[in-house]
Image (cartoon, rainbow, N blue to C red):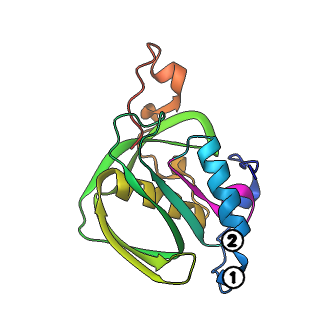
Amino acid sequence: MIREVLRMGDPLLLLQAQPVSDFSALSSLIEDMQDTMRHLDGAGLAAPQIGVSLRVVMFGFENNPRYPEAVPVPFTVLINPELTPLSDEEEEGWEGCLSVPGLRGVVPRWKRLRYTGFDLSGKRLEREVEGFHARVVQHECDHLEGILYPMRIRDFSRFGFIEELFPQGNAPEEG
């Protein structure tokens, strides 16, 4: 079922999400998140974005009209994630968010990281990633801490409405 995505300003998006302890109760949540993410052409979605304060994110796509130049990211459901940077190196990139529609901003993120957590069956998952994949994971996991990408922007001259920032319609790929 496609769910409504909460928008910036909703106080639920500012809460720290709770750890998942019962994996057996997640299947309908995961299905709703997947339906919602795909309906909106999202690269990822966090449970708090649909009003469920649990530490569950999903991300991934083969090709996506919102990210035409992005390399594919494997579809992943990540429960109770933990992120560890693999270096201090950061890179800046344009980001948007389903909870912040119509806006984009340049956000610094770790370039390389390891993420760990669990899949829907409770099996441990661990990956080392970089680039756009790393950016998407960090963006989605921020939602679990009550952080929206505008809170990470350092230079607000590179944040605004897509139509104003890119009047010729040449908005860069997010990420």
Is the residue marked by circle 1 packed among few (<14), some (14-19), or many (20+) residues within 10 Å?
Answer: few
Q: Which residues are magenta?
A: 43-52
Q: Which residue is mark 2?
A: 27
Magenta region includes residue 45: yes
Residue 117, placed above or below residue 133: below
Question: Which mark is drawn over residue 163?
Answer: none
Residue 74, placed above or below residue 39: below
Front residue of 109/47: it is 47
- Measured as percent of width and height from the top left, residue 164 is found at 52, 20
- Measured as percent of width and height from the top left, residue 102 is found at 59, 31
| Left or right of 130, for residue 21 | right
| Left or right of 5, for residue 134 | left
- Residue 33 occupies quadrant: bottom right
Question: Which mark is drawn over residue 24?
Answer: 1
- Measured as percent of width and height from the top left, residue 36 is found at 67, 49
Q: Is residue 13 visible?
A: no
Q: Disc 1 and disc 2: Cα gap in Å?
A: 7 Å
Which residue is pictured at 45% across the width and 20% down the height?
166
Q: Quadrant of the C terminus?
A: top left
